[in-house]
Amino acid sequence: ESGSDSGRAGTGSSGDDSERLTGVHIIRTASLTVRVKDVPTAIDRARSAAEDAGGIVGDETTDRDTGGRERSRLVLRVPRERYQEVLDALAGTGDLVSRTVKAEDVTDQVVDVDSRIKSQRASVDRVRNLMDQATDLSDIVSLEGELSNRQAELESLLAQQASLKDRTALATITLSLTETQPKKPERQKEEEDELGFVDALVGGWRSLVTLLGWLAVALGAVLPFAVPLGLLLGLWLRVVRPRLRVRRPRPAGPQG
């Protein structure tokens, strides 16, 4: 990859040039969380930024949170030469909440896989040559099994090589977009204040009605006993008490 990259035209930074010149292989990933006023518009801008740079939108998920605000998550794959440019463009779509950037050096892994592929191909060729020279059926069957195993290992190494090439050639950016809480219009705030006053008034009235209801219940519980008690009190004041006063003996006067 390093040899072919040295002849490519690009608008990369000095870091990209260093990678091509020294044969360094780096997997670049980034995660951005941005708060925006309009999520669909921000999605269109992010998609355009990736596609204009020669990249793609891998995954996209959009939903709403518990507060009803729209949110979206996009996974973008962009060429490493335009990685920083796209990253800056995405951060400028709204208010940046968080940003995480990682660079993993996989040069040793790339070199190791390339070397093993070279050795495995030579091994496969040797087994094929032996098969061409074999005359005994048992030897041919044994060599066919060995060839199948070595080809399977070669295919696995080639898949690792392709994965590394893709991950180093295209940077991965995970963009999370969240909708900002819209400001309430002045008229709406006034209406909410009025509704709050009305709610308080209604609450006070309900409390008063509840209190009167409890008083009515208490009065209803006492009322059946009020009439007999009133009659007894009247009888005491008009009949019994005057008689007690008449019967009470007067104190004797001083003797001369």
Image (cartoon, grey):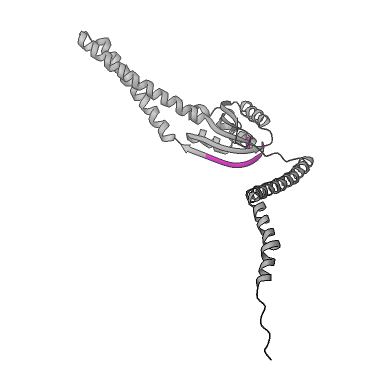
**Does residue 193 lie above or below 146 as drawn?**
below
Q: Give the range drawn in magenta.
A: 90-101
Q: Write the residue at 63% across / 41% down.
A: 96
Q: Write the residue at 30% across / 16% down.
A: 147
Mark count: 0
Q: Write the residue at 36% across / 21% down.
A: 154
Rendering quarter of residue 193: top right
Side of 58 where 230 appears, left or right: right
Side of 224 where 161 appears, left or right: left
Side of 92 where 129 appears, left or right: left
**Does residue 45 lie above or below 127 as drawn?**
below
Outermost residue, bottom direction?
256
Q: Which of 242 and 137 is in front in this view?
A: 242
- Give percent across and percent down for residue 220: 65, 47
Q: Which of 217 and 1 is in front in this view?
A: 217
**Does residue 163 lie above or below 211 as drawn?**
above
Q: Nearer the viewer, residue 17 or 250?
A: 250
- Give percent across and percent down for residue 45: 66, 30
Rendering quarter of residue 181: top right
- Give percent across and percent down for residue 35: 64, 38
Q: Write the residue at 43% across / 26% down.
A: 161
Q: Which of 40 and 157 is in front in this view?
A: 40
- Give percent across and percent down for residue 194: 77, 44
Residue 97 colored in magenta in the image: yes
